[in-house]
Image: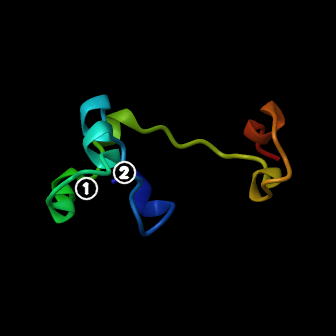
Amino acid sequence: MLMRTIHNRMPVILDNHAADDWMNPTEADPLSLKRLLIPAPDDVLLAQPASPLANSVKNDGPELLVAT
């Protein structure tokens, strides 16, 4: 799995329908939403180096995508 080499947790990637379910404040059984927590297929993820500037929320801009 692509993310395993970067971090020990996997991001949740939801399609529009699943996102609606996830954000539904009237969900009667919130624990049922665990079914949505599955690893994303590697073919939908892309890993690329980022600048150390990306480590601060004070920075924003395309220069964050340029590895140094």
The type of residue carrying mark 1 is Leu
Q: Is residue 30 left or right of residue 45?
A: left
Q: Is residue 62 left or right of residue 20?
A: right
Residue reaching furthest to the bottom: 8
Q: Upstream in the sequence, badge 2 or badge 1?
A: 2
Residue reaching furthest to the front: 26
Going 43% across and 69% down the picture, which residue do you hit?
8
Image position, residue 62 (x, y; %): 79, 31
> Tags 2 and 1 in contact by the CB under 8 Å rule?
yes
C-alpha gap between disc 2 and disc 1: 6 Å
Q: Give the position of the N terminus as an image quadrant.
A: bottom left
Identify the image quadrant of residue 67: top right
Image position, residue 27 (x, y; %): 21, 52
Q: Secondary structure at mark 1?
A: loop
| Mark 1, residue position | 37
Going 25% across and 51% down the picture, which residue do you hit?
26
Image position, residue 22 (x, y; %): 30, 48
Identify the image quadrant of residue 66: top right
Q: Is residue 7 left or right of residue 28?
A: right
Please state the total of marks drawn on the protein image.
2
Going 15% across and 60% down the picture, which residue do you hit?
29
Up-down: is 7 above or below 49? Answer: below
Which residue is nearer to you in this view: 62 or 43? 62
| Mark 2, residue position | 12
Q: Which mark is residue 4?
A: none
The type of residue carrying mark 2 is Val
Q: Secondary structure at mark 2?
A: loop
Crowding near the residue tagged with mark 1, few <14, some 14–19, many ≥20 C-alpha atoms within 10 Å:
few
Image position, residue 52 (x, y; %): 80, 55
Crowding near the residue tagged with mark 2, few <14, some 14–19, many ≥20 C-alpha atoms within 10 Å:
few
